[in-house]
Image (cartoon, rainbow, N blue to C red):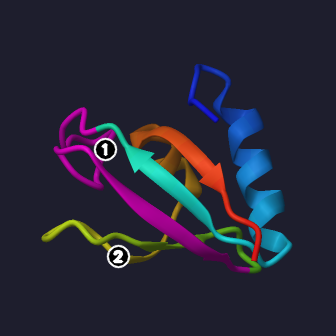
Amino acid sequence: YTNTSNTSSYISDIEAHLRKGHPVIVYVNGSGTSKNNKYSSVEHWMTITDIGTDGRVYVSNPYHGSPTGWGNINDVVVAMGEYIKVEK
C-alpha cells in the first residue's frame, strides 16, 4: 500500500491490522528528520509490532539513532512511504 494524502484511511487500516495481532512493515521514505519525520533522514524499513489500548503503536526501528518504542501512529504515517500488512 502506498501512502497518499488520505492518511486517515491508512491509519484505520494499520490500526485494524495491528488489533488482529499482525505486524505491519513500514517503508520510511527518508524525507529528512524534521518535525514531520522523526524516524530518519534516510530510506529504510521498520516494523510496527503492537498497538496499545491507548492507540499508541510500538515501532521497531533498526536505523541507528532513530527512535524505537511506543509512539503516536500519526508520526509513523507522516514518515511512511508505503506499508505491508503481514499475516502471522
The stretch in magenta equals 30-52
Quarter holding the C terminus is bottom right
Q: Nearer the viewer, residue 7 or 49?
A: 49
Q: Write down the quadrant of residue 57 in the picture.
A: bottom right
- Tag 2 secondary structure: loop
What residue is rendered at 55% in x and 68% in y?
A: 48
Residue type highlighted by circle 1 = Asn
38 inside magenta stretch: yes
Mark 1, residue position: 37
Majority secondary structure in the magenta region: loop
What residue is rendered at 18% in x and 45% in y?
A: 42
Mark 2, residue position: 68
Residue type highlighted by circle 2 = Thr
Q: Residues within 10 Å of mark 1 (few under 14, many from 20)?
A: some
Residue 78 shown left or right of residue 16 in the figure = left
Whichever of callouts 1 and 2 sits on the residue coming sooner in the sequence is: 1
Total tally of numbered discs in the picture = 2
Q: Nearer the viewer, residue 43 or 65?
A: 43
Quarter holding the N terminus is top right
- Above or below residue 49? Residue 7 is above
What residue is rendered at 70% in x and 68% in y?
A: 55
- Tag 1 secondary structure: loop
Q: Write down the quadrant of residue 39 in the picture.
A: bottom left
Task: Tell me residue 71's x, y (percent).
Answer: 48, 68
Task: Tell me residue 8's x, y (percent).
Answer: 72, 35
Extreme top residue here?
Answer: 5
